Image (spheres, helix red, strand yellow):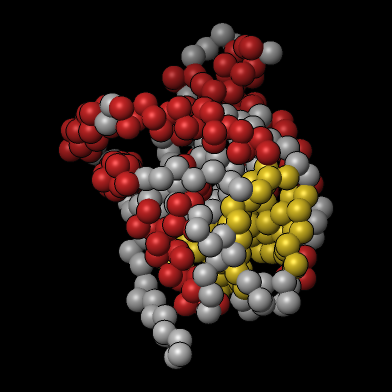
Amino acid sequence: MKSETVVFKGSKHFVLNDVAEGVFAVISVPGTGSLGNAAIIDLGDSTLVVDTFTTIEAAEDLQAAAEFLTGRTASYVINTHWHSDHTFGNQVFASTAQIISTSTTRRIMDSFARKRLEQQLANPEAIYQAIDELEVKIQQELDGKLKKEMEWDNATDREYIKMLPDLVYSLPTVTFDHQITIHGSRRSVEVLTYGGGHTQSDAFVYIPEDKIAVTGDLVLSKHHPYMTYANPQEWLNILEKLEQLGIETIIPGHGEVSSLKELHEVKGYITDILNIVTDVNHNKESIDRISVPEAYQDWYFTGYFKTNLKAVEDKIKLG
């Protein structure tokens, strides 16, 4: 029986970037149903995918790309953390792949994240209302960069709500607490966690022979990190440990393929957020009056800056 030739015609959701032989960064196109980045790794006799996007359609394109590039469907999927832009595409891979995460990530997905999804399914009108309200703000926004980001956000939310009725929430099937190594005939990869920084538990994929790390949202390129569930000091500690691995290339959770330069920029950002909040509290000022520092004014996810200040301030007050 002749095998069928797989043809991949590209995707509106992402751009493929050949990082090393058999290692591909899958970089999200803003305003589509992907939102976060992913990666495809050819292990030789099997294929590994890191993170699965927000929507089913984006994940289906990711599976098609993996099959086109490696000649096989994914056997392994890593969820770096529990956020929906890294996990909601799991259902596309669930029938053929082992889906792997930390034990803590799976526990959060099966409790808090599942409950939040159930609330959205029970009351989708709230999402439609938020889309309509943001549309009004888009028409009033005069700052070109902010307007473009808001348009991307609304387009992504429209893709999300369109997909939601067909979503089959798919949990990881294999969990680990420290490290798991996946061996292939061509290369082996290490999946590690140093605890929680960006979220309560963050994993990353390390390819020693290629000096590549797929970091999830522990590292972003020219994007404000999302710190609502973060432990800033632990995040800094994790980045210190990452740096010691001798990594040269980073496939980040958002933004273009990176290096240690972007890791250092994220460390600087987290440190600046901590210092700003400390100074504001010491001087009994309001964080609402703080503007985005010049160093980060060209970064995307601009709206997260004020959210991050508030999240860190609340964390400091709680001790």
Residue 295, compared with residue 284, is above or below; it is: below
Residue 228: horizontal and vertical position, in percent? 53, 28
| Residue at figure coordinates x 60%, y 69% from the top left | 47
Q: Is residue 146 left or right of residue 287?
A: left
Whether residue 308 is visible, yes or no, is no
Residue 280 point in image, percent of width and height: 57, 17
Answer whether residue 12 is visible to the viewer in this image: yes
Query: In the displayed structure, would residue 100 be above or below residue 195?
Result: below
Please give the name of the residue rendered at 40% of the width and 62% of the height, measured from the top-left corner: 60
Quarter of the view holding residue 78: bottom right
- Identify the residue at the far bottom of this view: 2
Which residue is pictured at 63% across the width and 72% down the height? 46
Determine the residue located farthest toward the front in the rendered image.
1
**The N terminus is located in which quarter?**
bottom left
Q: Quadrant of residue 75?
A: bottom right
Q: Position of residue 191 (x, y in %)?
A: 72, 54
| Callout count | 0
Q: Residue furthest top?
A: 284
**Residue that appears at 40% across and 65% down:** 61
Seen from the viewer's position, the closer of residues 213 and 269 is: 213
From what the image shows, is residue 80 above or below residue 270? below
- State which quarter of the image contains the C terminus: top right
* Closer to the camera in the image, 237 or 174: 174
Measured from the top left, where is residue 98 in percent x and y? 60, 56
